[in-house]
Image (cartoon, rainbow, N blue to C red):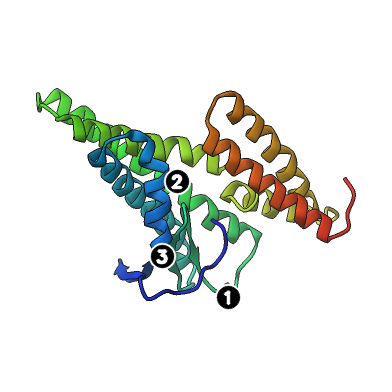
Amino acid sequence: MFGQVSRTPYDIEFSLLGIPARIHPLFWLVSVIFGWQLGRPDLVVIWVMCVFLSILVHEMGHALMARAFGYWPHIVLHHFGGYASFTPGRGYSAWTSIAILLAGPLAGFVFFGVVLLLEIVLDRAGVNLNQQLLVAFGMLGYINLYWGLVNLLPVLPLDGGQICRDVLSLFRRVDSELWSLRISVGVGFAMALLFYRLEARYAAVLFGLLALMSLQSLGARNERW
């Protein structure tokens, strides 16, 4: 989500469906910090595993779509998100970019549907689910549905912000970078205020920072609103 990060000696590396993946150590640390408010070590561990699985599914959505277009991606999980990186080649266009960007949230929505269906099937089969499993189902649903929708907001560098920029680029007379930054600032600060009023402090801080980053980028262009 927040750009590329350098390798460290503590990275975990693996391959999934032929796509290389790397986990930066800060991914685990930040996930624990966000889950610490749960107050129980077992729930914190479940939270971290749900975050890991959900973000991996999201980034695999991007990566698999990129590979379908003939590009060779790799995945990095870091901080409280990640990215699927690839080098655009022949045939790359705004529409290609939009398809790859949409594939991440779509993978998360499909995963949410699978989790919901599994929970319903187990319930109708009379399977008694323990508290930890019920909590895991709830966390997976929350992350993949709620975060997936939030990620589609037109705020850079979220998927929604990049999609907004690419859609605007289809209109040749519009400075897509400039207008996507303007929209990002406005929506970012609005969401920060909304989340603050909802007492969702982490989300408020996140969107406030994203809005400030976009505002800084606008300033670097010496552009006025």
Q: The residue tagged with tag 1: helix, strand or loop?
A: loop
The N terminus is located in which quarter? bottom right
Q: Toward which corner of the image does residue 11 lie, by quadrant?
A: bottom left
Q: Where is residue 202 in the image (x, y as percent from the top left)?
A: 52, 38
Q: In this view, does 160 lie above or below 23?
A: above
Query: Which residue is depicted at the point 39% across and 34% down?
Result: 142
Whichever of labels 1 and 2 marks the residue nearer the N terminus, that label is 1
Badge 3 amino acid: His
Whichever of labels 2 and 3 marks the residue nearer the N terminus, that label is 3
The residue carrying mark 3 is: 24
Query: Which residue is depicted at the point 63% across and 51% down?
Result: 163
The residue carrying mark 2 is: 106
Q: In this view, does 140 lie above or below 162?
A: above
The residue carrying mark 1 is: 89
Badge 3: residue crowd in 10 Å (few <14, some 14–19, many ≥20)? many
Marks 1 and 3, Cα distance to the nearest angstrom?
Answer: 27 Å
Marks 1 and 2, Cα distance to the nearest angstrom?
Answer: 23 Å
